[in-house]
Image (cartoon, helix red, strand yellow):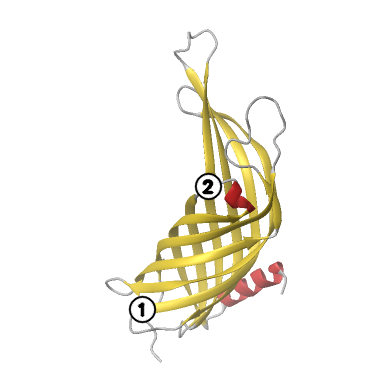
Amino acid sequence: MRLPAMVTAVVALAASSAFAADYGGSLVVGAPKGALDQAADVAGGLAGHALFSTRSGALALRLDGSWLIYGSQTVRLPIAGTAGRLVREITTDNWMADAAVGPQIVVPVGAARPYINAFAGVSYMSTTSHLRDPNGFVSAESTNYDDTGFSYGAGGGILVPLKGGGTLLDLGVRYVRTETMTFLGEGDLDGAGVAPRPHRGQANVLEFRLGLVFSSRSHPPHH
């Protein structure tokens, strides 16, 4: 199934009264793999998802989005005529984002809800710079390099109901694998006017997630 068709299926399920919607967000720490491992040691950021599931909660379609930063560098430039007492900062961030959709299966064990999922989508990698004036305001920004590619993977975790059952602690892990992409790492822009040589390969990431899910079901399903 192509990605647009998968997204259409998610929207159709969300509109159906036979399905319930849950929403969640997570803090993410990622371990770069593949070619990305040569450009970064760790990645960190945020993720969110929407889950359109059957009333039993056993089967669902999951729509995921995440944003991770895997490198950052700041250069301080003195402003001419200020004797070096005023500076402007140029911060360059290396980051990646992805959007994906796929099935999820939940198998309740007591009150807990272990789950597994698979997904496919797109990943976007970018190196951007922004200039801050002495007051801290961004006065200019630019995209130095970017690329987009197909991504896919699988994940799993466990949902633990908190008091009341409508909010659940989400402990999860997932592996994101991309097609061959080109991207920059921290320090690849040296400021000497030399065109950077981008890294090329798979920008895979093993993600560890800690978050919350807000469920429309106040109690875990039983079988």
The disc at residue 112 is 1
Q: Give percent across and percent down for residue 200.
A: 70, 49
Q: Residue at x 70, y 25 (%)?
A: 193
131 or 147, nearer to the observer: 147
Q: Give percent across and percent down for residue 123.
A: 64, 56
Q: Which residue is mark 2?
A: 69
Can you say whether 107 is above or below 79 in the image? below
Between the residue at mark 2 and the residue at mark 1, the CA separation in whole angstroms equals 31 Å
Quarter of the rendering occupied by the N terminus: bottom right
Quarter of the rendering occupied by the C terminus: bottom left
Residue situated furthest front in the rendering: 38
Count of all numbered marks drawn on residues in the image:
2
Q: Is residue 179 left or right of residue 89?
A: right
Label 1 sits on a secondary structure element that is loop
Amino acid type for the residue under numbered disc 2: Ile
Q: Give percent across and percent down for residue 177.
A: 62, 62
Amino acid type for the residue under numbered disc 1: Ala
Q: Residue at x 53, y 51 (%)?
A: 68
Can you say whether 118 is above or below 48 in the image? below
Q: Residue at x 66, y 72 (%)?
A: 6
Picture quarter containing residue 119? bottom right
Picture quarter containing residue 122? bottom right
